[in-house]
Amino acid sequence: MAVMQMQRMSICALKRDRKAILERLQSMGVMEMNHILEEDEDFHRMDTAKAKSSFDKAAASADHALEILQHYVPEKQSMLSSLAGKELVDRKRYGTVVQERDTLLKTAKRIQTLDKESAEQKAAILKIENSIESLKPWLSLGVPLNFEGTKYTVMIPGVMSGMLTLEQVYEKLAEQAPELEADVYIISTEQDTTYLIVVCLREMEEQMAEALRGIGLARPSYLVNQVPADAKSDMEKEISQLQSRISEIEREVSDLAVHREGLKILSDYYQVRREKYEVLGQLPQSERTFLVSGYVPQTQTAKVQKSLTDKYDCVVDVEELEEEEEAPVLLKNNKFSAASEGIVEAFGLPGKGEIDPTTIMSFFYVFFFGMMLSDAAYGVILSVACGILLLKFPRMGRGLKQNMQLFFWCGISTLFWGIMFGGYFGDAITVIAKVFFGRDIVVPALWFTPLDEPMKLLVFCMLFGVIHLFVGLGIKGYMYLKDKKFVDFFCDVVLWYMLLVGLLIMLIPSELFASIAQTTIVFPAAVNALGKWLAILGALGILLMSGRGRKNFGLRIALGAYDLYNISGWLSDVLSYSRLLALGLATGVIASVINQMGSMGGKSITGVIIFVLAFIIGHLFNMAINLLGAYVHTNRLQFVEFFGKFYDGGGRAFHPFKENTKYTDIEEETK
């Protein structure tokens, strides 16, 4: 349970070692750059925009080539391949790729050129296919569509709406221009369209064209200078040639897939260089020296200092942070609690002066998650599945690995609560024994069965909630004591403890509590009196001291009364823990219903098949839906009820200067 102490490290070195020192710092990945020296007449910052743009383009070119390769030659990946994490590349292979980077960039550009050509060929094929489609109605025509006619005649091709007969066309033409004579030939009809040609004397061409427009004839949009059937044949040959070229391109791109790993390393190389030049552009530099300044975890400062001073002529200064300086936050926890760091980060990292709540929160998180899922079989499945994935994919990403570890521990907690409550796929053992073997077997709960005693579980849920909230209030008190705010500790923590404990002592012997707990608890008179006085003194103290910063007595009392009203908030928070009961019962009830439904087929082969199918599908569904519910509601109990008592968050995450790669991880150098 700790926020790692940060120190400011400043490095002054010779300009000749600038590249080597930056690469060393980047490979170590433990320093967040934070330059405090501004430009002046002696120190300036170099313009690295052009270099960064060049590296961005090179990385983008490699990425684009990889996307094309994935389209043409997809990598074979299993369903769980996303868990494997980045590929680990040794330094020798990395160095080889760096030396061959120009050749690989040409390969990337060649892949993009081929893909562009393929796209152009496909676009050309689509265009030709559209042309063929437009020629289909004219295939029976024995002359080109743009045939100009003979010495004395002209041919006018056209399209009319409707499925017309030859007589109907002549009638329309006679109505429009009875003085004109022409021969009409219907080439084809389809749906609501008629394709035809009109032959007339050349001297009547203009009048005939005007008359044809009047009856709704439109010229074809596509005219070829070949007989349509011949044009179609030539177009099909052209398509065949284009498809052959596309096949050649696909084969060539497939052959270039051997460079896929190199392109991945190349993309990462340029991305790393881009980030290095990003930092380089921020460094204050003089004619012969340069300065680097930033945050380093206290545990790493000696290592960084030794690594630099042993190899380079430089001065490394390490100093404590100033009081008002807000350092980035890096959490450090044991293996169990580290799995819950993602939950804290989702809410917000500790702000200045706050403690890391991960360790305490992780215990309650796993505890409550198990209560909500509360089935031993589900817990075993969850832990075994997560354990196998963690062992099989040790290089999975940090966030995913933390989640797997967290659910592993949640599975252990679920197993514990399942044994305590007697839940093994609900009541599957009892149902199977009775229906298929005719025997009465009941696996007893180690503690009690929630379905039989729900009110008892409700009481314990409230008890665990009170403990959770009291711990949160206690952490608030610890933070006050650490900051030597003794008055705040007494007024905002001790007085509330007095009021709440007093109210609890008064509540437990009451008839209301007895009706809920189904048991009567009697305290000695002295304890009852103690509870009353604690509640009275606590309430009076809160009323008088909550507004202690105000000089106006009336305003002070008003603020105290308002703060005292917050007791309703405490009641609401405690009642929120009833969700432990609700989700725990939901898991058991749904599981029991699934078992009963599956056993309706009775003791027969059909009944066994029905039971197995219902069992597998039903319990998978029940486990999935209740896993989601447990995750969401456990988060809520931490974020709203627990953190609301002492934690604000708002800290800034530690972002070290390191090799942020997309596809691969570069193996660390061995000494």
Image: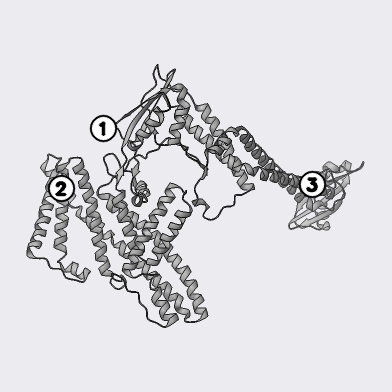
Left or right: 199, with 103 as reference point: right
Circle 1 residue:
323
Q: CA distance from mark 1 to mark 3?
A: 80 Å
Left or right: 630, with 641 as reference point: right
Disc nearest the viewer among 1 and 2: 1
Q: Which residue is pictured at 50% across the width and 81% down the height?
A: 604
- Quadrant hosting residue 552: top left
Q: Residues within 10 Å of mark 3 (few under 14, many from 20)?
A: some
Q: CA distance from mark 2 to mark 3?
A: 90 Å
Q: Quadrant of the C terminus?
A: top left
Q: Amino acid under label 1?
A: Glu
In the image, residue 100 above or below residue 609: above
Whether residue 213 is visible, yes or no, is no
Measuring from the top left, give residue 522's x and y in whole percent. Answer: 12, 68
Disc 3 secondary structure class: helix
Q: Which residue is pictured at 46% across the width and 54% down the height?
A: 391
Left or right: 37, with 129 as reference point: left
Q: Amino acid under label 3?
A: Met
Measuring from the top left, give residue 539's x and y in whole percent. Answer: 13, 52
Circle 2 residue:
560
Left or right: 660, with 111 as reference point: left
Disc 2 secondary structure class: helix
- Quadrant hosting residue 483: top left
